[in-house]
Amino acid sequence: MRGGIGDACRVAGRDPEDLTLIVVTKFHPASLVAALAELGVRDVGENRHQEAQAKARELASLDLRWHFVGQLQSKKARQVAGYAHAIHSIDRDAVIAPLDRLAAEEGSRPPIDAFMQINLTDDPARGGVAPDGIEPLAERMLASPALRLRGVMAVAPLEEEPASAFARLAGYSERVRAIAPDADAISAGMTHDYAEAIAAGATHLRIGSAITGKRPDPR
Ligand SMILES: *Cc1c(COP(=O)(O)O)cnc(C)c1O
């Protein structure tokens, strides 16, 4: 995997040091996450709250950063904040409000790294804010004491070339940076499209099956 990332960086003229590799371990047991940690993995991604919470609890003694990458339910947001170092799926006010309440209650809690998920499809059922909602959501995230706005996140649509989808995402990232200049991170790139994501400026790759092998069926 490192080799493939290195090749894609060379082609794109980018430094692999500028990339964070998040290994997405969804549906795999905690024992696999522990084995990855042994190999030096520090950033792991999960997309379902209950599964993520259980693994984070079981592996609390390991020095892991948990990235929540799945669709977030507003009533679960508070609990996700209990273990997540980063949430990649902030897409509406309803998931921010409970985090703000939590931050107000626990005055000293450090802000969570937050990525604005943007929907690159026309299907509103997919996660992510529609592009016309980017500016207001950026303002909302910037104003939230619970969050540290890091940048944007997206999943490439199945029915489109990833390069063109990620080019749009790079444009959306510029719009966010016009409001929040420090929010320069781009969470994009999975097993089948990480090279295109790197070429388009991704800073956080979310890679599952290329590293973990085929996922077991979800339980
Ligand atoms: C599962 C998942 C990934 C990793 O997918 P692979 O194709 O296995 O690399 C990345 N991002 C999100 C949001 C996911 O749900």
Image (cartoon, grey):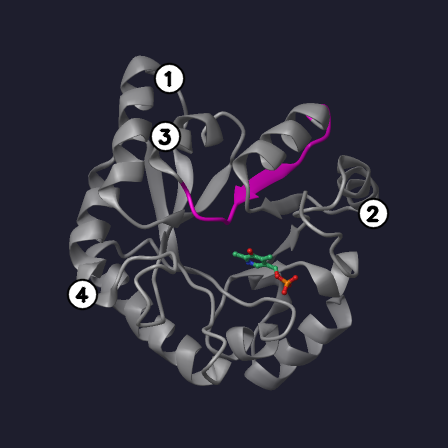
Mark 3 or 1: in front is 3
Residue 68 placement, left or right of 109? right
Quadrant for ligand 1? Answer: bottom right
- Tags 2 and 4 in contact by the CB under 8 Å rule? no
Residue 132 is labelled as 4
Q: CA distance from mark 4 to mark 1?
A: 34 Å
- Tags 3 and 1 in contact by the CB under 8 Å rule? no
Residue at which label 2 appears: 39
Mark 2 closeness class: few <14, some 14–19, many ≥20 residues within 10 Å: few
Residue at which label 1 appears: 108
> Residue at 30% of width from left, 74% of height from top?
171
Q: Which of disc 2 and disc 3 is earlier in sequence?
A: 2
Q: Report x, y in % for residue 170.
A: 36, 73
Mark 4 or 1: in front is 4
- Tags 3 and 2 in contact by the CB under 8 Å rule? no
Residue at which label 3 appears: 75
Label 1 near ligand 1 (CB < 8 Å): no
> Residue at 59% of width from left, 66% of height from top?
190
Q: CA distance from mark 2 to mark 1?
A: 33 Å
> Residue at 21% of width from left, 51% of height from top?
137
Range of magenta residues: 60-72
Residue 130 placement, left or right of 193? left
Residue 38 placement, left or right of 88? right
Examine the rendered structure and indicate whether residue 127 appears above or below residue 85: below
Mark 3 or 2: in front is 3
Main secondary structure found in the magenta portion: loop
The local secondary structure at tag 4 comes to helix
